[in-house]
Image (cartoon, grey):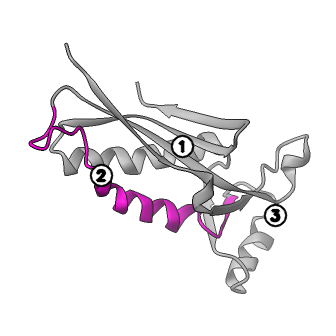
């Protein structure tokens, strides 16, 4: 069986500046810190469309906007952070754009992005194209991949 794959990358140079902390960490990751996150999406199809493409690279604009809305100039906090009230207050005072998630880290960010993008791509292509994986980069040395097997 033939399979075609395409890869779309929204690199860290695009400036998706996101801050977060992993309050359970024993390392400095327990402190608020941030990165210009990068995203890599791998798509696959058995057939090409009428333009001989797996997926139109220009059709990623909606996904890019979603990434920007959630990971650009945002402060992501875990819903179980013991300082949740204090961190939410920062948002209430309009000092930060707060995104509250069940868990915080590149693994969770990759899964969250996968869930959104997979449904969007499947609907857009009437199920012809599957999202295989999403990788989220903190920087060149650290990343996490989510695949729904």
Location of residue 132 (image quadrant): top left
Q: CA distance from mark 3 to mark 1?
A: 24 Å
Camera-side residue of 137 and 56: 56
Q: Residue at x 51, y 65 (%)?
A: 68
Against 34, residue 110 (above or below) is: above
Q: Marks 2 and 3: in contact by CB < 8 Å?
A: no
Of marks 3 and 2, which one's residue comes earlier in the chain? 3
Q: Residue at x 49, y 59 (%)?
A: 67
Say which element carries label 1.
helix
Camera-side residue of 98 and 135: 135
Of marks 1 and 2, which one's residue comes earlier in the chain? 1
The residue that mark 3 highlights is 83
Q: CA distance from mark 3 to mark 2?
A: 34 Å
Q: Position of residue 89 (x, y in %)?
A: 74, 78
| Range covered by the magenta-colored residues | 48-77
142 on left or right of 30: left
68 on left or right of 131: right
The residue that mark 2 highlights is 120
Q: CA distance from mark 1 to mark 2?
A: 15 Å
Q: Position of residue 114 (x, y in %)?
A: 44, 43
Furthest toward the bottom, the residue is 93
Callout 2 environment at 10 Å: few (<14), some (14 to 19), or many (20+)? some
Callout 3 environment at 10 Å: few (<14), some (14 to 19), or many (20+)? few
77 on left or right of 14: right
Furthest toward the top, the residue is 1
């Amino acid at each position: 069986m033939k399979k075609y794959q395409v890869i779309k990358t929204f690199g860290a140079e695009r400036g998706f500046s996101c801050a977060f902390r992993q309050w359970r960490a024993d390392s400095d990751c327990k402190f608020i810190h941030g990165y210009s996150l990068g995203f890599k999406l791998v798509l696959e199809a058995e057939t090409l469309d009428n333009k001989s493409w797996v997926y139109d690279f220009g059709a990623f604009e909606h996904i890019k906007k979603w990434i920007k809305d959630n990971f650009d100039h945002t402060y992501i906090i875990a819903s179980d952070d013991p300082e949740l009230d204090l961190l939410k207050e920062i948002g209430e005072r309009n000092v930060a754009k707060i995104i509250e998630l069940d868990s915080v880290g590149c693994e969770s960010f990759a899964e969250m992005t996968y869930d959104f993008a997979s449904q969007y791509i499947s609907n857009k292509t009437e199920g012809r194209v599957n999202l295989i994986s999403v990788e989220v980069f903190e920087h060149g040395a650290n990343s996490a991949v989510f695949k729904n097997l």
